[in-house]
Amino acid sequence: MSLTSPTDRPPTATAPTGDVGGPVGAGVRPAGPTRRRQGPLWLMTPGGLLLLVVVVVPFVLALWMSVTDLDQYTLRQWAGAPFLGLGNYVEAVTTGPLLHSVWLSVAFSVLTTVLTLPLGLAAAFAAHDRFRGRALVRSIFLIPYVLPTFVVGTVWRIALGPDGAVNTVLGSVGIAGGNWLIGDRTFWTLVLVDTWAAWPFVYLLCLAGLQSIGREVHEAVAVDGATWWQKTVHIVLPSLRGPLLLAVIIATLHHLNNFTLPFVLFGSPAPDQVNVLPLAIYSASFQTFRFGLAAAMSVASLVLVLIPLLFYLRAVRLDTGLEKGAQA
Amino acid sequence: MTAGMQATDRRRSGVDATAILPPGLRRAVIAVLVLLVLAPCAYILVASLMPDIEVASGAVVPSSVTLENWVAIWTTVPLAQGLGVSLLVCGVVAVLSALLAVATAYVLVRFTFVGRITFLRALVGLQSVPGTLLLLPLFVVYASAPTYLGITVVGTTWGLMITYLTFALPFATWVMVTYLRGMPVELEEAGLLDGLSRIGVLRRIVLPLSAPGLIVAAIFSFLLGWNDVLFASVLTQPRTRTAAVVLQAFGASQEGGALPLYGQVMSSAVVCAAPVVVLYLIFQRYLVGGLTGGLK
């Protein structure tokens, strides 16, 4: 089963061989894997125009802004802002928060991804087996993923306050809660709340992977008399390598780009311990109005995102929509 | 897996061969995870029924239950207006992005042209471009529109619409690409034989047949707009604030106040989550497949 397909249909209608196109002839060609050359390409213009205006032009502008000294005074005549060369990049690395934020973002993404893996796997294993009420359990597992991030952030922010519900519960079992939203612990607050919200994604990908293990494999294992642990380690986990890899890459990308959760939990400017890259860029843009510096940092964040993204692009077979791992 | 198959299976072997975990462990895992999910959710619902002061003092069990918050939120915060803006913007984005996505995907799947693979690659890549990279330059572009084109973009609902529409397009198109790939071409060929034009085929054959894919694309586009705080916080003015920004600002403004209105924040949070939860419940069957199709 293709992980990307919204249905269970195998995407065989267009095989990768069809890309060269058949001989050009008049009228209709026989059905098959052949793709035609003379297409109504104009159908792509509205989408293409939008992408040009809202993504490509701003992207080029971001590159240009990152080498200028653009701030709230020069914004009105932004085309004439003084040229700085690599000055913003140098400042971001030396006196700016860039290195600290990159480190925080990477640590946050890796930790959250690592923490969500066992939760998502355990959930997928449990929800894969047949039992009464399975559909309900599957729906419940999706709730944290379904809730909008700004709702999750708002609610946890209140619950994690000094006199909030979390500390009440902790206090009732004799643990002094303390401060979750200021001070050294904030980083772990962010990791834990994001873990709570993000594990269902791993669960979904793993569950889809589990469902693609053939029934005969299960029966062969049962005949062999393997224990559940042996089955898990030697049969199930190896066959989940593809979905797990995909989950790790996508989750890492998602955590790296997560602006909403830290922003809603801690506000902006954020405490130093949670000043992850998206927040640092946001506050450089809209609190200190150092637009050039912010642009330089956002270009750096793109470079950071490119690392998992390149892995992702390699893992997805563009022409068939099948992940390589899904077939292994 | 039908109920019938399940029954015969159980009769035959007595044990479910496809099971992975032993029943005891499975129950333990489910119990822990369900508690992990439901405890905070139950708290949100309970807290939305508690007086503000009890939520602020960290009460978990309410001493009294009241519907006051649910009444008060409509006057203390412009929540209704925020919901209206969000519904309008996201609704328009959902419909337009599904339609644009199916048109674009149709060309990408059924025809070949120079740059096709690059475009497909860009569709995947664009889903993970950091929003913070584009926010500021996009703001500059929009802010220059009055000077160069004589139209105002910043602070308008349609400015928000084009922004979300564009960011929703890569994923929506990707969903439709995977969907159309699975659709047999024979029906389209038959349509061409019957004298339909390419556009006729798209309108009369592809569009109706790809309804499940369109639903997934539309809902994810809707959610992208509904869940966004980053762009809405900069591109809106008080009158065009989305529900997300209204809730975020409401929550943040209560900190340090003499009497934080936390009970009301909780009810507002439930209100903001409700449309999304309802959408998922209705379309769960379609969405679970689509969820794994790309980045959130």
Image (cartoon, coloured by chain):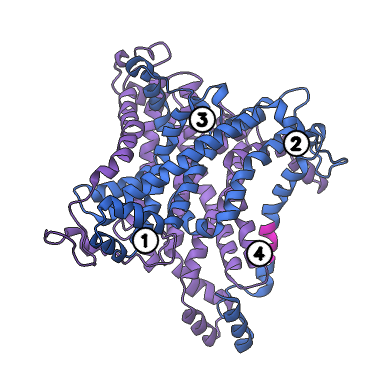
Numbered label attached to residue B232: 3
Tell me which residue sits at (57%, 38%) in the image: A261
Of mark 2 and mark 4, the one earlier in the sequence is 4
Q: Which mark is residue A323?
A: 1
Tell me, yes or no, if residue B255 can be seen here: no
Badge 1: how crowded within 10 Å, few (<14), some, or many (20+)?
many
Judged from this view, the residue extending furthest toward the front is: B194
Q: What residue is rendered at 57% in x and 29% in y? A: A270
How much space separates mark 4 and mark 3, taking CA atoms?
Answer: 39 Å
Q: Which residue is mark 4?
A: B29
Mark 2 → mark 1, Cα distance in angstroms? 47 Å
State the residue position of label 2: B70
Q: Position of residue B31 (x, y in %)?
A: 70, 62
The chain holding disc 1 is: A
Above/below status of A295 relative to A221: above
Mark 1 vs mark 3, foreground winner is 3
Pinpoint the chain carrying mark 4: B
Image coordinates for residue A152, horizontal then vertical, percent? 62, 42
Q: Are marks 2 and 4 in contact (CB under 8 Å)?
A: no
- Image coordinates of residue A161 in percent, x first then y, are 72, 35
Indicate whether A242 appears above or below A148.
below
- At a point 30% along the width and 49% down the height, the residue shown is B121
Q: Residues within 10 Å of mark 3 (few under 14, many from 20)?
A: many
Q: CA distance from mark 1 to mark 4?
A: 29 Å
Disc on the earlier residue, 4 or 3: 4
**The one of A64 and A296 positioned closer to us in this rendering:** A64
Q: Nearer the viewer, mark 2 or mark 1?
A: 2
Range of residues picked out in magenta: B28-34
In which quadrant of the rendered image does the N terminus of chain B lie? bottom right
Q: Are marks 4 and 3 on the same chain?
A: yes
The answer for which chain carries disc 2 is B
